[in-house]
Amino acid sequence: MSSIDLPTRAATETAQAHGIQPDRCDILQNASTLVLRLTENLVARVVTDVDGPRKGGEWFARENAIAAHLTCHGAPAIPLHPDLPPGPHEHLGYTLNFWKFVNIIDEPPTNEDIGRTMQQCHAILSIFTSPLPSLAIVRESIDLLQTLRDRALLPVSTIEMLRAHLEEALQVLAHYPQQALHGDAHPGNLLNTTDGLLWTDWEDAFAGPVEWDVASFIWNPLLLDNDVRTANEIVAAYCRAGGTLNLEAMNQCLIARAAVITAWYPVLYPNPNADRQSKLERRIQWLESISSHGGNDFGLILP
């Protein structure tokens, strides 16, 4: 039996239980989450990493609540499928939900559209009333550090450096206004489609400063690729669309985002290729340089 047979069965049987007969089973993603296209417009997302660091369905329920809110208010986000209850659904030991299929186009989004659609999502999320954990991914990453130490996945000195950055982020960012966020805003979670630019993958949603999502998206171009122009164009577009950003919060979020990604890298990529290993090493070096010199001028210009 293939490793995806049982989660595939969970998805197809759940769809059938709600009156939808799958006529295909196209694998769109096969990682810790299995994404399957089951009909012309139905996509199932099944959590297959049942023994991973995230157990239980609380985070999945948060994602569904966020996605339902965004769908209801016409946000530039991939909508939940209208023909099934939003869930999350549980079947055969798997947690899953269902989304509308979208057609991706092979054209990179403009920086203007990136900033604009992120701000549109933030505006709609600002009226999301259900409680969300504050700075959840930062707290989760601090808890993860003990696993990294126990399994010797990173040097102890690196782990303690990450702890210092993450704990400082909790203290500093607690002083800024918080609202519902995407939580993991990066280019892979923004799709250019025939329906326009759409955000997806809300499983890391939490309450925090809006600067977190902006910093998450611009980290790679700004600090890995030294593409300050792209980062500033996205920031400017976000502000033109009605967003307001604080430079100190942005800088703190850039540091915290790098620490979060570094903490999760050994879990997400236990056997990284050369490119991923290089990026991990560069993030660690950058975070160590911040620790050593206390610099926080990253070249951002806020309107």
Image (tube, rainbow, N blue to C red):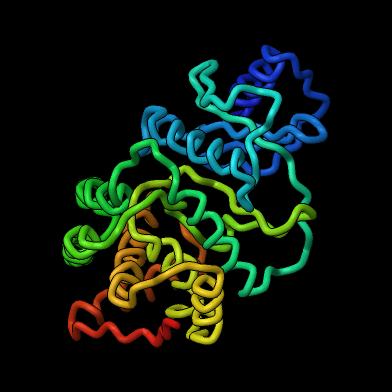
**For the point 43% across and 51% down, which residue is it?**
126
Give the answer, above or below, for where 176 lies relative to 112.
above
Q: In this view, does 6 lie to the left or right of 179?
A: right
Q: Picture quarter containing residue 78? A: top right
Foreground pick, 93 / 82: 82
Quadrant showing the N terminus: top right
Task: Report the label total.
Answer: 0
**For the point 38% across and 31% down, which residue is it?**
58
Give the answer, above or below, for where 118 lies relative to 96.
below
Foreground pick, 241 / 284: 241
**For the point 69% across and 35% down, which residue is it?**
43
Q: Is residue 248 left or right of residue 171?
A: right
Q: Is residue 208 left or right of residue 17?
A: left
**For the point 70% across and 37% down, which residue is it?**
100
Percent position (x, y) of residue 32?
51, 40
Q: Can residue 41 be seen in this view?
A: yes
Q: Can residue 166 be seen in this view?
A: no
Give the answer, above or below, for where 184 lies relative to 27.
below
Percent position (x, y) of residue 166?
23, 60
Percent position (x, y) of residue 252?
28, 70
Quadrant showing the C terminus: bottom left
Percent position (x, y) of residue 33?
54, 38
Q: Picture quarter containing residue 62? A: top left
